[in-house]
Amino acid sequence: GILEIEVAPDFPAASDAIRVDASVYTTACSSGIEIEIDFDRIDIWSLEPCECLLPAFIRQTRSIEIGTRPAGEIDVHFGYRYTEPTCGPIIEEPLASESFFVGGEANVITTTTPQFPRVGEDVALDVDYLLGCAVGSVEIARDDRTVRILGLEDFCPEVPPPYSFQALLGDFDSGSWILEISLDCPNPDPMNPFSCQDTGGPRMIARRALEVGPIAFSTPQLIPAEPRSDEPFEFRFLSSCPVTVTPSELENGVVEIEVAELPLGAPAPCTDPPSYDNGIQFGPWPPGDYLVIASGPDDPQDGSNELLFYLPFSITPADTAVEVGDGRFEIAATWRDFDGGTGSARGGELGGDAAGMWFFDDDNIELVVKVLDGCDENGHFWVFASGLTTVETSITVTDTDTGATWSYTNPLGNRFDLVNDLEAFSCAAP
């Protein structure tokens, strides 16, 4: 705006020496700044000509030392003051105003429980004070990010202060909040010496900030930790409060996840440490390098998303070919199930000459293929295959020395009978 102020300290008490840093925007024709300080008011005037033909505006900052002030509100006003003789009598044009509060914290102690609350946690405010009378009840009102706590005084006991009361504030969104604590005597009784007395309405005795921490998250992880190109995988993390997670489409190897808080008052409470499990299924994706970025919840101050964490990872090619016979032969297989689903078999060596392969679960071997050296018997390498499945299975064995291939397909729905080909590959030198 045209007037911006910063107060040091941020929340001054009645015993603090106070400095106000004021930034104002004057025209390019301004001849100076005049500052007038009163008991509860600061006036800042830009000395302007009657007419300025220069369209530019200039930001000017002044530091104003006002010393100590009693508890209460101080107004800061800014405007133009026209002083040229041709303008006639002095003309003042108010443009903007701000205010800040000087608290009576020298006589008031406020404590929140928990001291550093997180999103969703209920907060209690305890107020101990030396001025006023005992509080019988409390009223609480919220306005934007300000909470106003009004202690309704009841009587002034013979016991001297300090007095105290507690206000149950409920839970909060993350970010900075202002707590304003006031006292009021709603029902004064002039005839009762122990009654509170009318002071002209609510009077603020303290003002303080409350910082509410964001939702806590665990370190994200991938399941499995090293995903392969032929299998889905899960991105998982824990949160201290219930959240919703919305992933974007994969673009240039990056997926962005938006994390959003559930509305306050959601049935599930927040926990410490984080215990809410959040998982998102991805894949299968091709081999390559990828990045998952999680951001949010929105910063309540400026609406921007906070970067929560990011996880770079790689997807490796699937083990769709198994080498046997000291690496000379590669065995690969594909499958098609009754629902039309397809995929590549994966597996590993079984004793150097054979491969055990699985389709859906690495604990369930579906296919065994063996290549034996029968060169001394009939001048050929032999291939044996056996399947424990009725899905369509296509097997390919490749002689990496010659490039020759051998293949076999078991149709969908057929029992996989034992295959033995004693002339699968010639032993003759290529």
Image: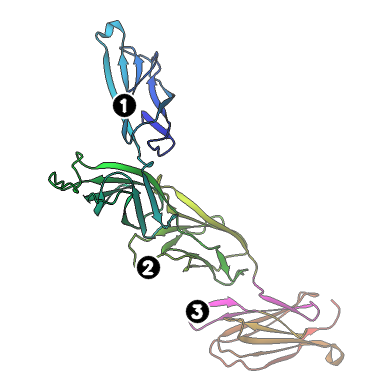
Q: Position of residue 339 (x, y in %)?
A: 48, 81
Residue farthest along the front direction in this orientation = 158
Q: Is residue 117 left or right of residue 75?
A: right
Residue nearest the viewer, comparing 366 with 338 = 366
Q: Are marks 3 and 1 in contact (CB under 8 Å)?
A: no
| The stretch drawn in magenta includes residue 77 | no
Q: Position of residue 93 (x, y in %)?
A: 27, 20
Separation of marks 3 and 1 at Cα, in angstroms:
84 Å
What residue does disc 1 label?
A: 39
Q: Which mark is residue 268?
A: 2
Left of 224 or right of it: where is 329? right
The residues bearing labels 1 and 2 have C-alpha atoms spaced at a distance of 51 Å
- Please state which of residues 9 and 409 is positioned toward the viewer in this rendering: 9
**In the rendered image of this protein, does residue 322 appear above or below residue 154?**
below
Q: Are circles 1 and 2 on residues that touch, CB within 8 Å? A: no
Circle nearer the viewer, 3 or 1: 1
State which region is magenta: 318-346
Q: Amino acid at mark 2?
A: Ala
Against 127, is 225 above or below? below
Chosen colour scheme: rainbow
Work out whether residue 139 can be spotted. Answer: no
| Spot occupied by residue 308 in the image (x, y as percentages of width and height) | 51, 55
Secondary structure at badge 2 equals: loop
Compare residues 355 and 172 and report the one nearer the observer. Answer: 172
Three-letter residue code for mark 3:
Gly
Q: Quadrant of residue 47?
A: top left
What's the residue type where badge 1 is placed? Phe
Q: Mark 1, residues whose alpha carbon is within 10 Å: few (<14), some, or many (≥20)?
A: few
Q: Nearer the viewer, mark 3 or mark 2?
A: 2
Q: Which residue is mark 3?
A: 340
Mark 1: which secondary structure? loop
Q: Element under label 3?
A: loop
